Image (spheres, helix red, strand yellow):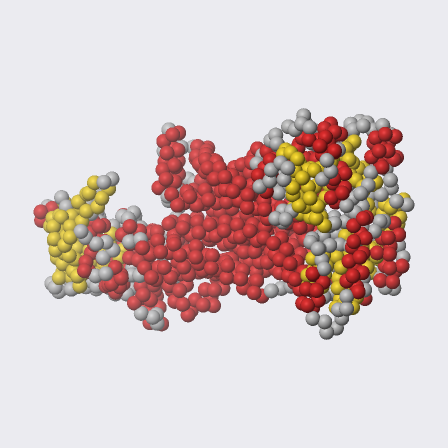
Amino acid sequence: MRSVLSRASRNFLWRHPWQLALALLGIALGVAVVIAIELAMESALTAFDQTRKAFSGTATHRILAGNGGLDEKLYTRLRVEQGIQQLSPIVSGYVGLPNDDRFRLVGVDPFVEKSFRSAWQEENSDTDYFARLITEPGTALISEQTAARLNLKVDDEIMVTTGNGEQRLKIIALLSPSHAISEQALSGLIVTDIATAQETLGLFGRLSSIDALIDDEASETLAQIRRVLPSDALLLSAGEQSEAMREMTRAFSINLKALGLLSLMVGLFLIYNTMTFLVVQRRQLIGSLRAMGVTRRQVFQLIIGEAFWLAVAGTTIGVVLGMALAQGLLHLISGTIDAFYFRIDAAALRVTPVQLGKGILLGLGATLLAVLPPALEATRLPPMTVLVRSRLESGVRRLVRITGLAGGLLIPAGLALALLSGKSVMPGLLGIFLLLFGFALLTPVFTLLAMTLIERVFGRFLGILGRLPARMVSAEISRTGIAIAALMMAVAATIGMDLMIGSFRQTVQEWLQGTLRADLYVSLPGEKKSIAGAAGDRQLKARLAAHAGVQMLSSVLTTHIIADEALTKVSVFDLNARARRGFTFKQAAPGGVWDRFEREQTVIVTEPYAYHHDVKVGQTIMMRTEQGKQPFEVLAVYADYSDQGHLAMSRRNYQRYWPDLGYSGIGIYAKPGVDLKQLEDQLGQSLKAPRSIRSSQAIYQASMDLFEQTFTVTETLRWLSAIIAFVGVFSALMALQFERTRQLGVLRAIGITPIQLTALITGETGLMGLAAGLFAVPVGYIVAYVLIFVIYLRSFGWTMAFHVNVAIICQGLALAFGAALFAGVLPALKMARTRPVEALRNE
Amino acid sequence: MSKEAAIAIHQLGKSYEESGRRHRIFSGLNLHVNRGEFLVLLGRSGSGKSTLLNLISGIDLPDSGSVIVNGTEITALSEHNRTLFRRHNLGFIFQSYNLIPTLSVGENLLLPLELVKPLTRADRDAVAALLDKLGLADRYDTYPDRLSGGEQQRVAIARALIHEPDLILADEPTGNLDLETGRLVLEMLDTLVKKAGKTLIMATHSREVIGQADRIVSIRDRSLVSADAFGS
């Protein structure tokens, strides 16, 4: 009995392959987006972890300092005087290769490093080239894969570029990674001994960090280290470092995952729609089965069982699609993390069973959840029912009122949750989801009102046929309502995101135009760790100042200092009056900022720093210096959209406590009447790579390009949810037209031509799109508001002005209308082509 | 009653394919129906009664032969022209009523009129008058799902007649109705169709209809047999 029962149900699906395909596509797309984001995000963060582990191995702790690093004597003191054996000194920095590849140069003590069992040395511990690294200056190791990629072999030389110019390194051996993870980690590494790294990076007598292998129980050893540490150094556990890195990207990760969930939510509507339709369409079959003695439980099991197998198939396709999509997203996500958070080396997609399990569970769970209401509805069908569509719809009207009421309650709840949840990103996003869901529940009510209005206003001019499309939308609200809600959600999210990105773009444009006051900028790239390198920077600055076409200069050094017990980015400014005018203060101490900024022990902080660290004007930040902790008063909070927050202090203040590390950038203000292009060419000729000179316009353009690149991930995900919504509308329309085949056949029988029928159906789908678009505009506006003033503020600490762009709203409307109209073309043509005799076959 | 042929069917052949096998429904079928005649079509289920009505209305096309309605060979017309022909010359009554659920009773009746010409006040009055005649005067704005089966079939009859076609085709119009309601519907057809001089072809099993018909034919062995041969 059971197998025949299943066959009755299964055969229906086989006879409606497009419905089956759309249901599978809905599940697959939703699952694919969620899995892709999860995999890409985790792979990017794992790449960072792997690179760190590649040269810190099993180290449990790390001693680090601000830029300028640690004095190498600290290592000797800890090892010889304190007798702490499990220590490994590290000198690291980024170098460039002639082909523009960027590598991390890591200087280690090969013999000490052995006990740390770093990934790179597992297979190579017995060879003699460790000794050669120490005895032969300027020698290095790279992986076999890197050598093959760069077409290098043993004894070849590579030219690396650092802030100090170019250096040659001789490859003395190739490392053979023992597994894929170490191969991945080694792909961006050049390994040398300490002395070669110091020489190459210009860090004479300095170490970047010291790794330590200390049992967590050995609190005495940790205390011993802390006692010896200079006041400008920090001891951090590996877990703390890893957690800090993940904490930094948590908001970014949550935002991406929210976009993935939006896709799944839109997909859920689609699955619900499809499954409901599959049940409704078979109400005669179910009624007959019930009359034959099939119990409610068996009907329920039949529907759920069918949904389960659909979910399994859809999720499987979704997992495969998700992995392919993740590969594309990984590049975009790594780029964003690299630009805004921390340097990340080449990442490869890593697929773990846990991540896949999450996606599979989500696909199966979401499908079964979506099918629960129609499955319960099926069990309520009386035996031999001949439920007419209109009866069903009158029941749905009651449901529409209830869901409308629920939507009306969810919207203020969502708003309250978003606005009144402190600084947390998660409740803010949950608020947006509640808002969207609330508006989605309200969509059928809005649609009924809109259709009534359209009919009242235009009905008298349109005649009976002209009124039919609006009537059809209203009459079949159980199907049209869900499709419109799904489309509305996707379009509202699109409008909301576009308004937010547009507002952000305009804010950044205004900020850049205000900030880039100089005519030309000289960039002095590389990590500023070398005191020796500073002399070269100073000479360059003097040379620039002496040029006949230069009126004045400003400068910045970007470095890291330990502030309030955390390694913090600091901009050290030497500003002239024109440069100062480029700062927009969000809050400032009374009585002026700049005089106190130069003369007193003060800092100004960026808006994100103030937000994330809860810092206000007048408060004090404690900074570690060689002379102990020093208090710096916060004078002002200024607008900055370059990163996740930093401090700024005057050069005079900085030099009181920290070593001169030169400059990261020099702003050049030309004398009036000087040809800027000529000046740029003249000054550029005297600069050696990697130093470069660019006009403020070029920097502006590059910054805006970076801005656009950062939002590529968002754009991609947004379009994916729009595609899912489109599939939803298409599926609903196909289902609708299929279900009303006979009704359309009657219209043909009484004399309606195929063209009139096509116009009727496309009129209906156009109205559905219009309803979705019209409702999506205010919803998108609210979403944009919450994104700007809640989510982005909490995620990044940036405030921005809300710029309403009419073009974006029109685009949203056009998207909804166009998508629905386009989705309706195929069903309309299909129905118009159907011969009336086929449509009336059951008569 | 004029004896001029309203419908002339010559050598009609129709078959369909199922599971790779071709099933013949008609072969060399001939039929003449006079203008104003009430013809009853009998036959077992699946004998092809509905198919014949579909062929006469131009909803379906034969494999061979011709169908001429009011002097127009509809089997020679394009799909578009057949639709226009139906619009002007035919009224169809279905067993399951097939009213448009998204239109009110009044609008269901106005639709065939609107397909022919722009609506006027007179059209609305005509619809109201017909509904009044059918005892549905208070149902103008009601939607079909609020009507009983008998009421729906009365509206369906009104829809088939409102644009005053010459030919009415009725496919088991009382098939879904109880005896009493069926009788009422037939009386109505008798009054509105037969007495108005319109040609009516009805596929039915109803004995009462058989008594009212001008002529009875039956589909047997893929061709038509007259009432005499049928022996009723």
Percent x, y of residue B193: 22, 61
Q: Is residue A401 above or below residue A519?
A: above
Going by the image, does A750 lie left or right of A664?
left
Percent x, y of residue A811: 53, 62
A577 or A406, nearer to the observer: A577
Percent x, y of residue A770: 49, 60
Residue at image coords 15%, 50%: B13
Residue that sits furthest to the top in the current view: A126
Going by the image, does A221 lie left or right of A409?
right
Residue B17 is at least partly visible in this image: yes
Residue at image coords 83%, 28%: A84
Going by the image, does B52 lie left or right of A595?
left
Q: Is residue A434 above or below residue B74?
A: above
Percent x, y of residue A114: 72, 28
A102 or A431, nearer to the observer: A102
Residue A265 is at least partly visible in this image: no
Where on the picture, by quarter, is residue A666? bottom right
Q: Is residue A322 above or below residue A749?
A: above
Image quadrant for the N terminus of chain B?
bottom left
Total of numbered circles in the picture? 0
Where on the picture, by quarter, is residue A88? top right
Q: Is residue A782 above or below residue A208?
A: below
B134 or A180, nearer to the observer: A180
A506 or A333, nearer to the observer: A333
Going by the image, does A697 lie left or right of A8?
right
Residue at image coords 46%, 37%: A313
Residue at image coords 37%, 56%: A828
Residue that sits furthest to the bottom in the current view: A673
